[in-house]
Amino acid sequence: MPDAGLLHAGGEAGGVLSERDALDAVAGAGERDAVSVARRWLDQYGTVGVATVIKTSGSFPVPVGGQLVIGPGDRFEGSVSGGCVEAAVITEAAGVLAGQPKVLAYGVSDETAWHVGLPCGGKIEVLVERLTGADDARYLDAVLAARASRSLLVVETNLESGSRVLHGDAGAFETGVAANLSAGECQLDDAPGARRFLNALAPPVRVILVGAGHIAQVLSDLATRLGFQVTVVDPRTAFSTAERFAGVPLNHDWPERALPALGLDSRTAVVTLAHEARLDDETLMLALRSPCFYVGALGSRRTHEKRVARLSAAGLTDAEIARIDGPVGLRIGAKGPGEIAVSILGALIKARHGA
């Protein structure tokens, strides 16, 4: 049991981020996120290019909706193919920056396939657009604001003209398409003469870590690098310090206050790492009765048995308790904080994709 002094909760402003902080944090690793970089470079250079994957077939490491931002000189950030066609797209973008949007297509039947890295199979289409001026700045701000509020934003782009319409929800589309968009699945409408791409910008997957120990330090860094929106919750201010979690939002409230304020939705994972029964149990009772897609709890099998008994006595059903991944993480024989963090991240990714 931690020393009582370490359980002292922080002050009034403990877990509160300013609006600017929230916008900076929503992309996880904001320094490397394509939209965040595009917005920053737009202010810095006046014009940027954005390449978006609109269609794939075969095996591709970047899904539809993946983006690459291109700046002046050799500057670029993000990815559309994991390295296969980036050089070709960047070269084409130079022309787009001075003209109209363009859809690029690459595939094994293309005689340039060997040059752009697709000789092993697969096809890809990429929309390259120029962003410049106040209207495009407002567009990027709207994307970042939707992320900050965890709201769906659908960007409808006419692939012929490049015109763009923003939808705050999927209500404007037919039922089947709307359902896919609401789930974060992008849609390509190939209707002749009216080809359009519907980019479903769903809220980022959020990972809430309760307990600011060494495993949380490593896991928060790894998850952020993968683009997850990470928050660490721990009222023990000796653990949850900015020095130990550089750039990661911290919340110093107790879980019963912090989690409802953050909101637990179907794009949220919760992992307890506190090694302290009150923090863990309070967290699990809220998370297990929410639509969170993943709930994990650190501890040995014996610790988990005791935890299950406490939760059962508190009124949780067997079905609710069975949702816990405990002991947390993939069974890979992990030893030490780094390997345990990797095993937890693997289990989280597996749950996210329903594997």
Image: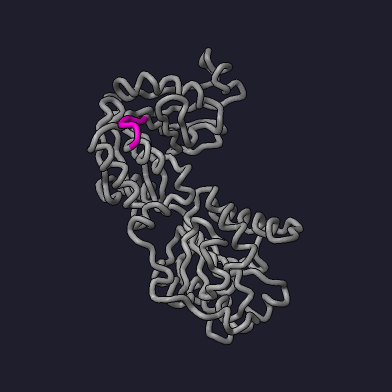
Question: Outermost residue toward the top?
Answer: 111
The answer to whether residue 241 is above or below residue 187 is below
Residue 22, image quadrant:
bottom left
Residue 25, image quadrant:
bottom left
Q: Nearer the viewer, residue 26 or 333?
A: 26
The answer to whether residue 271 is above or below residue 150 is below
Q: Please indicate, yes or no, whether residue 284 appears anywhere in the rendered image.
A: no
> Magenta span has 34?
no
Q: Is residue 172 left or right of residue 17?
A: left
Question: Outermost residue toward the bottom?
Answer: 313
The answer to whether residue 316 is above or below residue 116 is below
Quadrant where the image shows the N terminus: bottom right
The answer to whether residue 335 is above or below residue 168 is below
Question: Outermost residue toward the left?
Answer: 135
Residue 318 percent across, percent down from the top left: 58, 77
Residue 311 percent across, percent down from the top left: 58, 81
Q: Please indicate, yes or no, whether residue 321 appears anywhere in the rendered image.
A: yes
Residue stretch rendered in magenta on the structure: 44-48
Question: Outermost residue toward the front?
Answer: 243
The type of colouring in the image is one colour
Q: In the image, what residue occupies the spot 65% across and 58% down?
A: 341
Residue 152 percent across, percent down from the top left: 34, 52
Q: In the image, what residue occupies the spot 44% across and 32% down?
A: 55
Q: Is residue 193 left or right of residue 285?
A: left
Residue 215 percent across, percent down from the top left: 64, 62
Q: Nearer the viewer, residue 254 or 44?
A: 44
Q: How many marks?
A: 0
